[in-house]
Image (cartoon, rainbow, N blue to C red):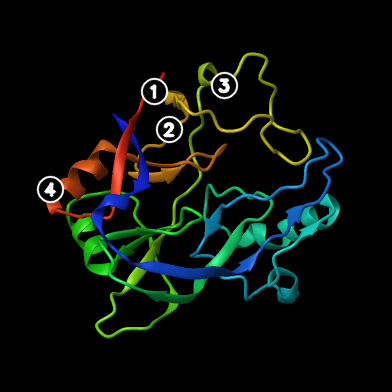
């Protein structure tokens, strides 16, 4: 199986813009006692509803907290996650809420890398046999007539980079907060042993890179779906 990274197609000429954020979020970590870093991820689970959590107000404001508070809040939401999900500082949940305008292609990417799709394009991919696609409702207001119905594609974090593409002397992630010790390398190499079966669209668990299979790419090309480009990523 061949794999591809997904990027916005800036040459397609679409003007669609979405200014939205997920309804709930875990705090980032402030000054981790293990690696001293202050950080958060762009991991998102738009299908996860946090309304069963009693202290919901703790998840409504983006911020950083000491790691002990992050860990306490993390355990409150863990039972609500889909099977196989992981949590990182700054993980967001629930529908994206905001506004949108412009002319949209089949796919649209936010500045954070959230991947959105028109409903009719998702239905075509599913009918074509593309596996594991989950389109999530978005609460966005359009400033135009004949607005498309956009859905956010939830991408499970699975798979990892192969150690051979990481710099010499690479150290494992922080044992306390999980933050990688080095930035994502420019030239990616996937660890084939960690890649999923049954998913044609996913994120890497370690660096959140959006990936898809050749089955996904071939279906998009055959169906004439646009708005994104695909770049092959080798495996080892």
Name the N-terminal-most of marks 2 and 1: 2
Residue bearing mark 1: 235
Cα separation between marks 1 and 3: 14 Å
Cα separation between marks 2 and 1: 9 Å
Residue bearing mark 3: 166
Name the N-terminal-most of marks 2 and 4: 2
Q: State which mark lies toward you, 2 or 4.
A: 4
The image quarter in which residue 179 lies = top right
Q: Secondary structure at mark 2?
A: loop
**Circle 2 Cα neighbour tier, 10 Å, few/some/many (<14 / 14–19 / ≥20):** some
Seen at 28% across and 75% down, the residue is 148
Cα separation between marks 1 and 4: 25 Å
The image quarter in which residue 229 lies = top left
Residue 28 is labelled as none
Seen at 44% across and 59% down, the residue is 110
**Circle 4 Cα neighbour tier, 10 Å, few/some/many (<14 / 14–19 / ≥20):** few
Name the N-terminal-most of marks 2 and 3: 3
The image quarter in which residue 187 lies = top left
- Image x and y of residue 131, in percent: 29, 49
């Amino acid at each position: 199986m061949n794999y591809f990274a997904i990027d916005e197609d800036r040459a397609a000429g679409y003007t669609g813009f979405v200014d939205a954020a997920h309804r709930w979020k875990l705090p980032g970590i402030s000054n981790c006692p293990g690696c001293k870093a202050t950080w958060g991820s762009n991991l998102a689970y738009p299908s996860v509803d946090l309304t069963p959590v009693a202290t919901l107000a703790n998840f409504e404001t983006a911020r950083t907290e000491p790691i002990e508070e992050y860990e306490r809040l993390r355990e409150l939401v863990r039972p609500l996650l889909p099977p196989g999900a992981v949590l990182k500082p700054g993980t967001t949940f629930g529908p994206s809420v905001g506004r949108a305008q412009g002319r949209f292609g089949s796919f649209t990417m936010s500045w954070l890398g959230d991947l959105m799709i028109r409903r009719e394009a998702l239905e075509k991919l599913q009918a074509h046999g593309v596996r594991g696609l989950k389109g999530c409702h978005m609460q966005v207001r359009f400033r135009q007539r004949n607005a498309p119905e956009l859905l956010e594609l939830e991408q499970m974090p699975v798979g990892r980079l192969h150690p051979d593409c990481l710099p010499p002397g690479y150290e494992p992630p922080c044992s306390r907060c999980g933050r990688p010790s080095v930035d994502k390398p420019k030239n990616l190499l996937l660890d084939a042993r960690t890649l999923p079966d049954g998913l044609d669209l996913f994120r890497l668990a370690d660096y959140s890179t959006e990936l898809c299979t050749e089955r996904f790419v071939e279906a998009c090309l055959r169906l004439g779906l646009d708005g994104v480009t695909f770049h092959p990523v080798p495996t080892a």
